[in-house]
Image (spheres, rainbow, N blue to C red):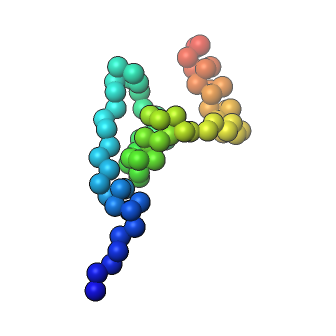
Amino acid sequence: MSKKIPPIIREIQNYKPQGVNYTFQKNVSFSQYSMWKSCPKHWSLNYREGYKKYSPSIHTVFGTAMHETLQHY
């Protein structure tokens, strides 16, 4: 008995992630790394091809404020 593999599964299985272009992006956040670790295609769609939608939350606002404060200090 052979199972038919859906085309999207075959595409995901055959996907070879590209490396990070260090001339374009010199740092990778933990959230980017964990996304890449769990699904390189998801990371590529979000960060390389620009499909990521930014939706601010209290956590991102606080993190940005803290980051800017530390950089200024």
Where in the figure is residue 20, as x and y percent of width and height? Answer: 34, 32
Residue lying at 63% horizontally and 36% vertically, measured from the top left: 54
Foreground residue, 67 or 51? 51
Corner quadrant of residue 17: top left
As drawn, which residue projects farthest toward the bottom?
1
Judge whether residue 34 can be spotted in this image.
Answer: no
- Residue 12 % position (x, y): 36, 56
The residue positioned 56% from the left and 39% from the top of the image is 52
The residue lying toward the viewer, choosing from 50 and 30, is 50
Residue 64's image quarter? Answer: top right
Labels in figure, total:
0
Task: Classify the position of the C terminus by image quarter.
Answer: top right
Q: Is residue 38 left or right of residue 69?
A: left
Whether residue 2 appears in this view of the structure is yes
* 69 with respect to 16 (left or right): right
Residue projecting furthest to the right: 58
Query: Where the N terminus falls, by quadrant?
Result: bottom left
Residue appearing at x 39%, y 21% in the figure: 24
- The residue sitting at 69% across, 36% down in the picture is 56
Position of residue 62 in the picture relative to residue 52 (left or right): right
